[in-house]
Amino acid sequence: MSPQEPFGNVRAVFFDLDDTLCAYWNAAKAGLRAAFDAEPVPGYELEEALKVWAREFRRYAEELKTSHWYEIYLTEGSTTRAELMRQALEAMGVTDPEHAWRLSEVYGRERDARLELFPEARNVLRALSGTFHLGLITNGPADIQRQEIATLNIGSYFETVLIEGEMGLGKPHAAVFARAEEACRAKGDEVLFVGNSYAHDIAPALRAGWRTVWIRRESDVPPSADTPRREEMPEGATHPDAILETLEPLPRLLGIRSLESV
């Protein structure tokens, strides 16, 4: 079975992690609800507290990478997660660092407990393993991302794992994609990136000359979103080589037998 155009030269496949291979947003939403249910904010109903958290997250995330918190965030996700909770509580008129830490701990624990691979993900990794150099490029704190990989039990599939917290920078920086090319000893259209974010995954991979597959799932709406809409491709932007709703068709695009026979 031959690879479909334009994937004929691909020798290495890199994946994003959250909401490409695993249902991170679903786990995050459930974890947040569990946290604010277990540690309620006086004077706020659950839905009201979640809306304040979402608003504060959007502000905090925009400021994080240019603040002193970023260096801490790279290696220690729990500290900056607790700081966000503290700021969210203050926005609700509550000054209580201990309450913030409890919310953070419950959220982190419950999110990890609910984290699951998408149903087809393991079979796709198994199908591609051995034929392609498989890699993972994921943004986030080193400890949190390593925990996710362990929770999902997928580390053995990847020859290269590049994590923002371990590199000191993340997608969409060009240096991340250059490092991936060095690791797999391939470049340009010999490398395919599979990801759920146009801005962080697809656009920078296209700039590197890679092949791209954009995964667009209905569930791909973060808990911090102010609308229930998925990310859209910017007007006039370059199209990815393929847009898929799940990972299931990926092996066929790359000339691999059907998942049913794996």
Image (cartoon, grey):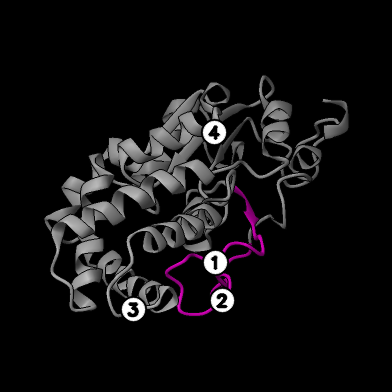
- Closer to the N terminus: mark 2 or mark 3? 3
Q: Which residue is mark 2?
A: 228
| Nearest to viewer (mark 3 / mark 4) | 3
Viewer-side residue, 64 vs 134: 64
| Label 2, label 4: how far apart the Cα atoms are | 27 Å
Task: State the image quarter where residue 56 is shown.
Answer: bottom left
Task: Using the rendered view, name the quadrant where residue 55 is placed.
Answer: bottom left
Gap in angstroms between the C-alphas marked 2 and 1: 6 Å
Q: CA distance from mark 3 to mark 4?
A: 34 Å
**Mark before the other along the chain sequence, 2 or 1:** 1
Q: Which mark is residue 152?
A: 4
Amino acid identity at mark 2: Pro
**What's the residue at 66%, 45% (across, down)?**
118
Q: How far, Cα to Cα, is label 1 from label 4?
A: 21 Å
Q: How many marks?
A: 4
Contact between labelled residues 1 and 2, with CB atoms less than 8 Å apart: yes
Q: Earlier in the sequence, mark 3 or mark 4?
A: 3
**What type is the residue that disc 3 sits on?**
Tyr
Q: At 59% from the left edge and 42% from the top edge, which residue is drawn?
A: 116
Dominant secondary structure of the residues highlighted in magenta in the image: loop
- In the image, 252 versus 211, the foreground residue is 252
Q: Earlier in the sequence, mark 1 or mark 3?
A: 3
Q: Is residue 230 magenta?
A: yes
Q: Which residue is denoted by mark 1 in the rendering?
A: 221
Residue placed under numbered mark 3 in the picture: 44
Magenta region includes residue 101: no
